[in-house]
Amino acid sequence: MTPAAQTPPTQTLTRAVAPAPPRNRRKLVGLLFLVPGILVAGLAIIGPWLTGADPQLIVAPPYTEAGPGLPLGTDATGRDVWVRVLTGGRPLIVIPVLATIATAVLGTALGAAAGYLGGWFDAVVSRFDALFLAFPPILAMLILLNGWGYSPVTLIAAVVVTGVPFVSRVARAATAQIVHSGFVDAAAALGDGSAAILVREVLPNIARPILADAGTRLAIAITLTASAGFLGFGPDAPNWGAMISENMEGITLTPWGVVAPALGLAVLAVSTNLAIDRLAGKIGT
Amino acid sequence: MRALLFLARRLLAAAGTLLAVSIVLFAGSEVLPGDAAAASLGTNATAEQTAAVRAELGLDRPLAVRYAEWVGNAVRGDLGDSIVERAPVTEIVAIPLADTALLTVLAALATIVLATAIGLAAGLRPGSRLDRVLSSGALVAVSVPQFVIAGLLVLLFSTVLGWFPAVSLIPAGGAPLDRPEILVLPVAALTIFAAAWASRLIRAIVIDADTAPNVEAARLAGLPESVVIRRHLLPATVGPAAQAFAWLASALFGGTAVVEQIFNYPGLSETLVSAVRHHDTPVLEGVGLLLAAIIIGSLVVADLVGLLANPKLRTA
Amino acid sequence: MIEITDLTVADTSGRAVLDRVSLHVSPGERVGIVGESGSGKTTLATALLGAIRPGLRAVGGTVTFSGTDVLALDRRRLRALRRESIAYLGQDPATALTPTLRVGGQVAELATDPSPESVARHLAGVGLPGDRAFQRRFPHQLSGGQQQRLALARVLAGDPELLILDEPTTGLDAITQDLVLRQIEELAAARGITLLFITHDLVAAARLSDRLVVLRHGRVVEEGPLAATLSAPRHPYTRELVAAVPDVAEAFEKYGHSVFETSRAPLLEVRALGAGHGRGRKRVTTAREVSFTVERGECVALLGESGSGKTTIARCVSGHHRPDSGEVVVDGEVLPDVRSRTLAQRRKVQLVPQDSAGSLNPRRTVGAAISRVLKVLQGLTGAAAEAETARLLALVGLPAEMAGRLPRQLSGGQRQRVTIARALAAKPDLLVCDEITSSLDVRVQAGVLDLVASLSESEGLGVVLITHDLGVIARMADRVLALRGGEVCEQGTVHEVLGEPRHEWTAALVAAVPSLRAELDARVA
């Protein structure tokens, strides 16, 4: 077993691979992509404080068009769409972010440990991954909703259960690449234990692919959370997912009840994904 | 010969995974709180009433016994009875499953064609303007929740242009195929997401194959570009692409769950959502098992395609 | 035939990769282009094919082949040129074979006449069977040597006038390298093909060229007939290059080799070591019943090809691999694996890994890598550690300010020196060096080897040297264990093993080992 070979060539003689833009420019562009996402997320989080109005209050006939006092019109039951947009975004930020952090932490721990320790632990984790990859995320979410009913914890659990296998596979592959490196041997020769080596030597070197993957995980978490609301599993308080399904029928009368929350969701997910894509570099998919 | 042996081993492993899935599925839906007996009686049922219903449904027996019975029956094609409808799950699920399958298969075919075309176009000229446009478009499309895509499609093609119906109205006793025009928007909504997702994978696979030393050598030997791509580059992409497309079964199902709701399409989504609302666990378990079997099955097919496309595995 | 005039190729920042390079090659000539990594030799070779790597640009000069301006050709004409006139064989030729194409197809698609009979002739030309059954095989069904030949048959199928060889033997063992070079030589002679041989290996160049062009930093520093250039180099760089070539025979005379009596208490004693990889049915035994000793100040080499088990044995000694059987004894103590060793035991044995992307943690500075060893194994911190780090860096010939650098800011030779400094920081008694020079240019190699040799002498370090390179052994080792399939097939002093090899493999290796002097002698005669 000779140590890892040189990194494979990323460019070839005969192929026109355009040179990557300089790192700093990539970072700048990445941060710019983050701006709209942060604006929407910020609005969603402070939204409930911006308006004192009750989002459940019926203020006008259903599907009233936008006008003075009603910037986005009313929804299927005559409630103020603008107030509901302001108050209905917070769960779509908080739940996916918490769930993504939990997924990344758990998946990285499992995958890195499996890649580093190998043996039976690796075999068990790989089986576990293969097993849970056979569950479509929505199905896992429905099963958990069936058992626990709606709560933020149910949704977080659904995201974690279906996301951990993906993160774990990424972390495992990245770890397996460096586990036979000279620097890991050197740390072992100093008497560092497995945990110390994982934290000090392995983690800093596998962070990039995991961060790149985290963007995808966050977008999926946002989609899943919103889908739950859309399918009717959510709090009684307004949420963007539910708003879209509630107001779909009246889309011909006034589109804002669907378009405003849809736009919020889209900007949030697209901005995160584009930003992570630029910041972390295009590592795999 | 070797391929047959491989297939046999792979099928055995797949059966093992499916068995493990069934355990997780059963344990996941039966151990968690949320009792069908309590749910079917409403909130003001007495303890005796609940116990009686539990006994009737067989819920008072040990979990292991119930699991063994469920799996045993499932192998013979019996997925148990719905608690709410008091009818066999297979019967309840059959028609919605067929309708969802129609949607999924159409979307899968469209996805395979589109994703291959986009992935090749972008992957053969990485960094070009075409690639930047296609890749950014794909990234945007995978990020947006599918019901948002569906909503935008409805807004554009039925509200503004009026080309296709916004709602899948099917005459009583009819099937979606009786009115093919209702399929267009749901399939499009599913395909946009799935094709974007798969095209990103195909692009990466093509780039990977394109930088291989044998492809470079073929170019330096002066072979025409079409020959280089067809004979030297594409064969290496078949296996990985099959793996990527195998996940379509899973990815598309996630989409149908919401897209069907948007269009009021008569598929599995409504069956599942109402099962969750009424704690109709057998329906959920049955559908879950079927889906897992389909997903695991498509992974086996992908492995087989990879095997046949690789002479090293095929002949060694 | 080839006329390159003042070719200048620059990267996007304007740095010249090739700087006003001119080259004239007449039909039937055999020209060797020699340079270290980064000299621009590959860029020069592929410019002849009209291929300039993305990110680089030809900013001046011309490349003409038989009167046509290669860099100005359109795609169609360029393809015709590559297909009909110029063949290119790159590094590790077997990887140029597409695994899904059968042997016959590999040759036929490039042949001027694609009939099975013609393909059979081309295959026979490189010593491969041309029958139908063979033509229907896939590349993976051929041996490594057959794959090399098939790759050669493939590029020669179009009856080219010029064959460009770009390091085709790098990474091959001495015996295979010898075979490949001989084959190319015969084919080129028989078919009158002009050869352009790009290599970092002066000895290989000496075998296959009549004229030598020495390239450094994108410039031609010396050019002339082979024998004259090598025996009386004019440019100091060429002199340095020639002097650094490991030559077994010369090294024998030049470097002292001590004969150590096996003492009653050797520094290292490996007793009946057995080890393997994998588990269950896939378990492969990579070392069987290996025993040897190392005395203080002695350098013992483990010689073998890849897969011979030499690295596994070294990792058992350093404690990074757990043996299945046998013992590793240092200073009379049986050592467990590295994690179970006491602080003192860990200090005594240090591993120097091959320089690769992973020999140093890419996220940690050189200084941090060394000072962590000082802290854990020596208890040194703060200013004391800083001073010691500087001393160690100076010891391996690096300036103290290197401590602030990250590994990617260093060259391969510098990184290898840092790994040696890191090992020395432990104040070890035994150094285990795993192929520490195989990825370095010859001039850098010589420096690293001299460094380890002088340290071994001055500090009384025992050294276990893992290598596949007889030149390295002749220069460094006192004793040799030749390993074949995990077993010791021959052992003895360097003079015994290299001078009068007894085992057939060692004998073949010694016979195949290239020697610059022998090549030159053969030329003059």
Image: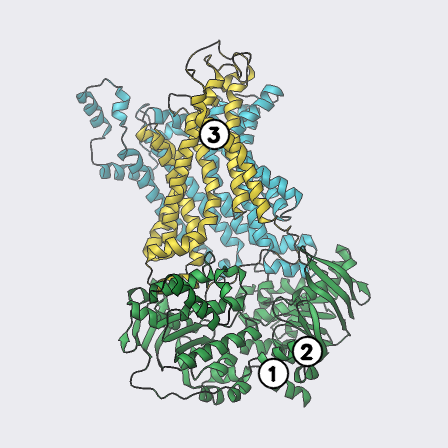
Q: CA distance from mark 1 to mark 2?
A: 18 Å
Determine which residue is flagged by label 3. A42
Q: Position of residue C431 (x, y in %)?
A: 40, 74
Marks 3 and 1: which is nearer the front? 3
Q: Whole-Å distance between the Cαs marked 3 and 1?
A: 72 Å
Amino acid at pointer 2: His
Say above or below: A124 vs C10: above
Identify the residue position indicated by label 1 in the image: C516
The secondary structure type at the circle numbered 2 is: loop
* Count of numbered circles on the image: 3
Residue at the right extreme, as displayed: C67
Rendered location of residue A12, percent (x, y): 62, 57
Distance from disc 3 to disc 2, alpha carbons, whole Å, reads 68 Å
| Mark toward the start of the polypeptide (1 vs 2) | 2
Q: Are marks 3 and 1 on the same chain?
A: no
Q: Is residue C322 above or below residue C240?
A: above
Colour applied to chain B: cyan
Q: Residue C235 — which label?
A: 2
